[in-house]
Structures are given as C-alpha cells and as structure tokens.
Image: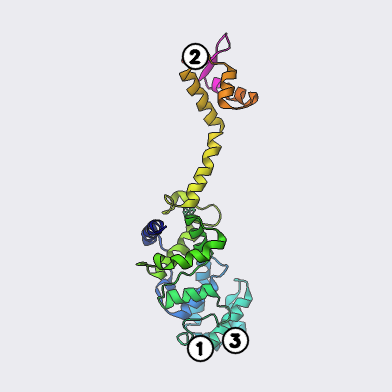
Amino acid sequence: MTTNISIFKKELKKWYANNRRSFSWRNTNNPWKILLIETLSQQTQLERANRYYEQFIDKYPTPKHMANDSKKQILKLWSGLGYNNRAMRLHETAKIVAKTGFDNLYPDFTVLPGVGPYTNSALLSFAYGEKVIAVDTNIKRILQRFFKIKDKDIKNFLQANQDTFLHRFESRDFNQALMDLGATVCRSKNPKCVICPLEKSCNKFITKNSQIQPKFEGSFRQKRGVVLKILLSKDNVTKNVIQKELEATSEITLRVLDSLEKDNLIKITKNKYIVINDK
Ligand code: SF4
C-alpha cells in the first residue's frame, strides 16, 4: 500500500505542476476568502463559482463588509446560484466572524452556520496550513477508484493514511491537485483514464481493462482469429472441427466462416474442407 501511495503522490505532484487551474484565491491564506469560495462552489462548478467570487470579494473584502450589508443586497449578488439558504447562512457567518474573528474559532469552525466537516478541513488546510485532507466527493472518488476502496471503508482508509499522503506534500497542493484532477480527468462519469497520470497503477483502470478482455475473448473478431490459427496448424478441417474448437453454436460458426470467406481469407473445398485462401 505504501508503495502505491508513493506512486500516487509522485504522479499527482508531477501532473499538478503542469495542469493546475489558476484562481486568485488559490494562493491566499485569508480564511474569509477561503470560506467565501468554498461556500460559493458548493454544488457549483468552480469556474462558475469563481465568477461570483470575484464580485463578492470586490463588494465584501472582509466579513465586516458583508455583516453590515442587507440580506437583500447579498441575495441580489447571489442571484443565479440557487440554494439561497446558503447565502443567508453566509450572512450569519459573516456577522459572527466579524465579531469573533476566525483565529478565535480555530480549529473548529463548524460552529459557524453552513460550515460542515469539508469546509472546516478546507479552512484548516488552505488558511492555517494544517496537514489535513479536505475530503470532498472528487477526492473520495479518485482515492476509491485508485486504491479500490469501498464507500464504507474510505473514512478508515483516510484516517490510517492521511499522514503518509501528506508527508512532504503540502496539504494545500494535495487537496487542490485532487480537486483539479477530479474536475478535469477523473470525472464521475466517463473518466478520461487514457490521459490520466495515475492510469498505470489505478485499480479502476486495471479492473476496467480486465473486464474488457473477456468481452474481446468472446468477440467475433477473436473467433475469426481462432479459425485462422486452426487452419494454419491443421489439415482436413471441417466446419464441425471448427465449431468444436470455438465452443460456439452452429449458427455463430457459420457466421464466422461466412465473414472470413467474404474477406477472401478462407475458402471451402469441393470436399467441404475449410482451408486458407492463399490466392
Ligand atoms: S485511471 Fe481513470 S479511474 Fe483511475 S484515477 Fe485516473 S481517471 Fe480516475
């Protein structure tokens, strides 16, 4: 497992160095900015959330600016994002943080309205540099696929291996790299395994390919290949011999022979033997 984790980290780091998405808040450790983007990007694509973020941070550069504004104004700026309750909770949070300050709540921000375990981890990682994995659906999906972990076991897996994952890997970079990989390559539907940096060692990729293999084994194309092999190694081959070798029905055997004949690869002699057509 440790070897797999090392490969995983090495490939991920390399990929992230060349493929990281660039956003203004990516290098900040300002907890307000982090809270803002994390709230805006819930159930929303990051690129879209980022457009809202730029407007929000412009109007509300600190929690105090938002705390002093009206709900109506916040909802106006939020318009189009949906889930308006989140805007309301953000307003409440801004009021609390404006009074208390983030540092006085550290390390447990879940007392703030709308802040759950994920946002708490994101704040700890991005604003406070803690060695914490911010486990969102992207990160879970990639780890589950790569290490072949069942849903029910992912929590224990992360608890047991968090330190190894984050050894000599900044948690900010680790979390952001996985978010980017999950959004662009290891997507929930149709993951782009062929361009994935983790493809060589990924369990999902290996399993997927080993599932494709049996299909090929039984495929029409594979049966044609078997017939040609038989004809190259044996004489006086009849349809029954081929059917037996193929372990196929009479109908399928005839279809295979018919297609080879149409392609001029085989021919049937007067004695009903099947031979390679070498003309
Ligand atoms: S190989 Fe495919 S399933 Fe595995 S991590 Fe990459 S994209 Fe995801």
Residue position for label 2: 235
Tell me the number on the disc at residue 70: 3
Q: Is residue 73 left or right of residue 18?
A: right
Find out if the beta carbon at label 3 lies less than 8 Å from the nearest ligand 1 atom: no
Range covered by the magenta-colored residues: 260-277
Q: Amino acid at mark 3?
A: Ser
Q: Position of residue 224 (x, y in %)?
A: 53, 26
* Image position of 91 with respect to 215: above or below: below
Q: Amino acid at mark 1?
A: Ala
Residue 271 forms part of the magenta stretch: yes
Q: Are marks 2 and 3 in contact (CB under 8 Å)?
A: no
Q: Position of residue 124 (x, y in %)?
A: 45, 76
Residue 139 forms part of the magenta stretch: no
Q: Are marks 1 and 3 in contact (CB under 8 Å)?
A: no
Q: Which comes sooner in the sequence, label 1 or label 2?
A: 1
**In 3D space, how far apart are the residues under numbered discs 1 and 2 (Cα atoms)?**
90 Å
Residue position for label 1: 98
Q: Position of residue 26 (x, y in %)?
A: 42, 71
Q: Position of residue 134 (x, y in %)?
A: 48, 70
Residue depicted at 48% across the width and 60% down the height: 143
Q: Quadrant of the N terminus?
A: bottom left
